[in-house]
Image (cartoon, rainbow, N blue to C red):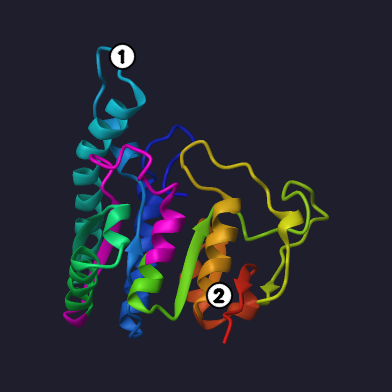
Amino acid sequence: MLTTDKGKLNVTRLSALVDQIAWLKEHRYEVILVSSGAVACGRSELKVEYALDSVEQRQLYSAIGQVKLINHYYDLFREYGIHIGQVLTMKENFEEGEQYDNQRACMEVMLDNGVIPIVNENDTVSVTGLMFPDNDELAGLIAKMMGAKTRVLLSNIDGIYAGDPSEPSSEVIRLVRPDDCIDEYIQTSRSSAGRGGMESKYHTAQSAAAEGIRVIIANGNRDNILPGVLTCPEDIIHTEFVPRK
């Protein structure tokens, strides 16, 4: 949802997302933002004159693009007087030990001081089998680590459909209870701009709900989707996973 059809950063959508998060902050929500977009930013910023392999592309474009991405967020949040902090992490940082504890302590002190942590994988060095498959998994680990009450996954569709989303007759599954199995409805396709997809969101949502975290999958392209699903969920089409108690 953060990229245009041409694979560039969608600054208009980014700005709308910041507006909504500012509203949440004003209404006393604590927010951690897990955001992709660095590679897209870097790719649009620099044209390379020779062929790069996939690892080189990821390292180069993410290194350049992360600076541009975080600057966008900085400028947009500054309009609301909101401070942000960048957290770049890797999969091994979620193994129990000093790195895990330091990472959690860092985000706790940021939240205690009104700073929004903006988290992304450190793509400049995470280029092996130790990479996160996508930011859906990363967001799940962050939610568990920080004891989040609610985790919102924004997609480019309204939620999980009981059928092909392109068919007008297909409806969004509004509620998934702990013992429900909806595997048959999960589409394995994904957008060209991201590594994740609905299959990934479904499995990480199941995992988070099993840990007692409420999970919402919603369409990030809809106006004011975040305030909507958090304050008037009955009025917004989305899929919600009920946490196990």
Viewer-proximal residue among 143 and 34: 143
Other-residue count near label 1 (Cα within 10 Å), few / some / many at <14 / 14–19 / ≥20: few
Residue 228 badge: none
The answer to whether residue 79 shows anywhere in this view is no
- Which is more toward the observer, 235 or 128? 128
- Identity of the residue drawn at 63% across and 61% down: 159
Residue 108: image location, x then y, percent:
22, 77
Above/below status of 189 relative to 171: above
The quarter in which the C terminus is drawn is bottom right
Image point 32% across, 72% down: which residue? 22
- Image location (x, y in percent) of residue 83: 18, 69
Stretch in magenta: 112-141
- Residue at point 22%, 71% (across, down): 101
First along the sequence among labels 1 and 2: 1
Q: Position of residue 52 (x, y in %)?
A: 30, 19
Residue 60 location, quadrant: top left
Q: Which amino acid type is shown beneath numbered disc 1?
A: Ala
Relative to 160, residue 242 above or below = below
Relative placement, left or right, of 170 versus 22 is right
Quadrant of res 201: bottom right
Residue 51's tag is 1
Q: Is residue 11 magenta?
A: no
Instruction: Identify the residue position indicated by label 2 in the image.
Output: 210
* Mark 1 to mark 2 CA distance (whole Å): 45 Å
Percent coordinates x, y for residue 6 in the rendering: 45, 32
Q: Mark 2 falls on what kind of element?
A: helix
- Residue in the image at 76% along x and 49% along y: 164
